[in-house]
Image (tube, rainbow, N blue to C red):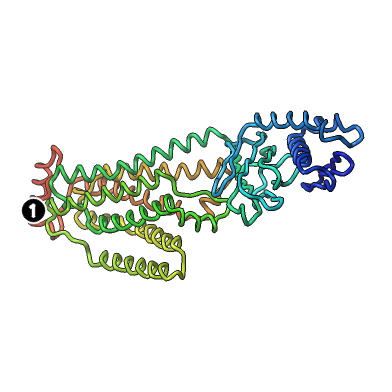
C-alpha cells in the first residue's frame, strides 16, 4: 500500500498509524478519513489537498464529512456483535461493492480481518486485510469477486474470535433461487410422504403388510434426529461449542430441519398407535430389530454418561445420535423389502409413501449437484459422500419398492404364516377379485 503523510508527524502505512504529537480527537478523525478514502479508492479527496503531503486537521474536516456521506451510501452495513454472522449478497464473477463494519465490542488494540484459506475468490481493494482501530467504531472496505467459491473473512482476536464476514461467488445467481425452490419441494414431498400410509391403515382398518421393524427403526431414528436438530438450533450452549470448533462457520440446522424432524416423530407415533388399534394378525418386532435397538440404546447411554462426567462435550453426544440415525437410514428399509418378497405382495405397504419419498430423495440429490456446480464445490459430494450416499441409498430402495409393487407382485401371491388365517382387506375396487385369486392359489 502507498504511504500517506498527513502533516509532518502523521504517517499511515500498511494499516499502522504514527502520530506522536497530534490531539487524540483530531487523530481519530484524520485516521478515519485516510482509511476510508484509501479503501474506496478516493485518493483524490486527499491528494487534491495534499500538494506537499501535509494538511491541518481543520482543513481535513470537509474531507471527513464527504467520506462519512460515502459510508452512509455504501450499500451493505454489518452490525458486529457477539456471535453475529454476516453474509454479503450473492456475487457473480466481476461483481464489486463495499461493506461497513460497525463494531460495538471493546477492541483493546488494532485487529486484523484476514482471509481464511484455502479460498481466494474475493479481493479487498487496495489492501490484503482490513484493520479495526480501537478509537473508531466502524470500518469500510471495498471488494471484488474474482473466482467462484466461498470465502470467510474473520477477525484475528481472542475477544472477537466469532466475528466474520462470508462471501459467496457463484456461476449463475438464478440457480440459487432454483436450489431454494427445489429445497422446499423436497421438504414438502418428504413431509407429506408419511400420510399415505396413515390413510391406507385407516381405510383398511388393518396394518397387516406394514413391517413393525421399519416403524421401530423410524421412531428411534427420527427421535434422535429431532433431538440433534432442536439442540443445535435452540441451545446457545451447544451453539457455542459448535462455533468454537467451526470458526467462521454457520449453523447447519435451519428451522425447517427442526420442523420436519419433530413432525416426523409425531406422525410416526400416530402410525404406531394405529398398530395397537387396527388388525395386525400377530405381527411384532423381530428379534433382530430388538437386538439392534438394544445396541443403539446402550451406545446412547454410554455416550450420555461420558458427557455427564464431563469427559466430552454434549455436542459429541449429539453427533453420536446423528450417526445412529444415519445407520438406521441404511437398514430401516430392509425388513419391509424382505417382507414384501416373502409375502409376494405389497398390500398394506403404501406405494404413495414410496413415490413421495422417491420424489424428495431425487430432488435432494439434484439440489446437491446444482449447489456443487454453482459454488464450484464438488468436494461437498465426492469429498464427503455421506449425505449423497444416504440419499442415493434411499432412492434405490424406493426403486426396488416400485418394481415390487408394479412389476413383481401386481397380482398378490400367497401370504406368509402370520396372515394365513385372515385375508387382507384391500381398499380398492379390485379387492374381491384379488381375494378370490389368493384363495384359489
217 with respect to 47 (left or right): left
Dot 1 alpha-carbon crowd within 10 angstroms: few under 14, some 14 to 19, many 20 or more: few
Indicate the position of residue 117 as horizontal and vertical percent values.
65, 52
Q: Is residue 27 visible?
A: yes
The foreground one among 36 and 86 is 36
In which quarter of the view is residue 53 placed?
top right
Count of marks, rendered view: 1
Indicate the position of residue 272 as horizontal and vertical percent values.
21, 53
83 with respect to 224 (left or right): right
The foreground one among 392 and 416 is 392
Compared with 49, 370 (above or below) is below
Residue located beneath label 1 in the image: 422
In which quarter of the view is residue 56 placed?
top right
The residue depicted at 58 percent of the width and 36 percent of the height is: 89
**Extreme residue in the right direction:** 52
The residue depicted at 37 percent of the width and 48 percent of the height is: 395
The residue depicted at 87 percent of the width and 39 percent of the height is: 7
**Element at label 1:** loop
129 with respect to 180 (left or right): right
In which quarter of the view is residue 58 placed?
top right
Indicate the position of residue 139 as horizontal and vertical percent values.
68, 40
Indicate the position of residue 133 as horizontal and vertical percent values.
71, 46
Q: Quadrant of the N terminus?
A: top right
The residue depicted at 23 percent of the width and 67 percent of the height is: 287
Amino acid at each position: 500500500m502507498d504511504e500517506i503523510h498527513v502533516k509532518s508527524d502523521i504517517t499511515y502505512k500498511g494499516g499502522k498509524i504514527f502520530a506522536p504529537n497530534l490531539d487524540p480527537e483530531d487523530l481519530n478523525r484524520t485516521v478515519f478519513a485516510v482509511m476510508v478514502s484509501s479503501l474506496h479508492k478516493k485518493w483524490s479527496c486527499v491528494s487534491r489537498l495534499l500538494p506537499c503531503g501535509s494538511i491541518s486537521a481543520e482543513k481535513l474536516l470537509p474531507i471527513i464529512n464527504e467520506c462519512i456521506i460515502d459510508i452512509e451510501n455504501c450499500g451493505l452495513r454489518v452490525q458486529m456483535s457477539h456471535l453475529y454472522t454476516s453474509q454479503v449478497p450473492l456475487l457473480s464473477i466481476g461483481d464489486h461493492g463495499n461493506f461497513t463494519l460497525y463494531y460495538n465490542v471493546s477492541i483493546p488494540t488494532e485487529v486484523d480481518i484476514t482471509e481464511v484459506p484455502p479460498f481466494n475468490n474475493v479481493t479487498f481493494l487496495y489492501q490484503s486485510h482490513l484493520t479495526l482501530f480501537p478509537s473508531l467504531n466502524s470500518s469500510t472496505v471495498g471488494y471484488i469477486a474474482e473466482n467462484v467459491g466461498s470465502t470467510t473473512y474473520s477477525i484475528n482476536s481472542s475477544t472477537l474470535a466469532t466475528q466474520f464476514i462470508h462471501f459467496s461467488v457463484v456461476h449463475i445467481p438464478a440457480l440459487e433461487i432454483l436450489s431454494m425452490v427445489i429445497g422446499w419441494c423436497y421438504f414438502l414431498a418428504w413431509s407429506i410422504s408419511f400420510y399415505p400410509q396413515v390413510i391406507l391403515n385407516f381405510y383398511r382398518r388393518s396394518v397387516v403388510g406394514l413391517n413393525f421393524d421399519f416403524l421401530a427403526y423410524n421412531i428411534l431414528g427420527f427421535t434422535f434426529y429431532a433431538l440433534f436438530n432442536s439442540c443445535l438450533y435452540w441451545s446457545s450452549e451447544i451453539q457455542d461449542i459448535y462455533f468454537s470448533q467451526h470458526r467462521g462457520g454457520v449453523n447447519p440446522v435451519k428451522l425447517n430441519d427442526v420442523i420436519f424432524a419433530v413432525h416426523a416423530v409425531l406422525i410416526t407415533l400416530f402410525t404406531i398407535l394405529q398398530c395397537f388399534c387396527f388388525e395386525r394378525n400377530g405381527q411384532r418386532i423381530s428379534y433382530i430389530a430388538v437386538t439392534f435397538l438394544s445396541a443403539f440404546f446402550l451406545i446412547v447411554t454410554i455416550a450420555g454418561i461420558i458427557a455427564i462426567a464431563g469427559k466430552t462435550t454434549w455436542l459429541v453426544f449429539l453427533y453420536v445420535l446423528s450417526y445412529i440415525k444415519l445407520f438406521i437410514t441404511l437398514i430401516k428399509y430392509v425388513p419391509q423389502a424382505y417382507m414384501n418378497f416373502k409375502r409376494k405382495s405389497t398390500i398394506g405397504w403404501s406405494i404413495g409413501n414410496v413415490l413421495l419419498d422417491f420424489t424428495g430423495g431425487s430432488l435432494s440429490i439434484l439440489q446437491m449437484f446444482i449447489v456443487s456446480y454453482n459454488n464450484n464445490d464438488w468436494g461437498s459430494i465426492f469429498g464427503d459422500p455421506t449425505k449423497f450416499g444416504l440419499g442415493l441409498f434411499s432412492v434405490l430402495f424406493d426403486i426396488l419398492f416400485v418394481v415390487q409393487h408394479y412389476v413383481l407382485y401386481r397380482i398378490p401371491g400367497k401370504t406368509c404364516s402370520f396372515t394365513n388365517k385372515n385375508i387382507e382387506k384391500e381398499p380398492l375396487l379390485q379387492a374381491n377379485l384379488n381375494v378370490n385369486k389368493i384363495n384359489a392359489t
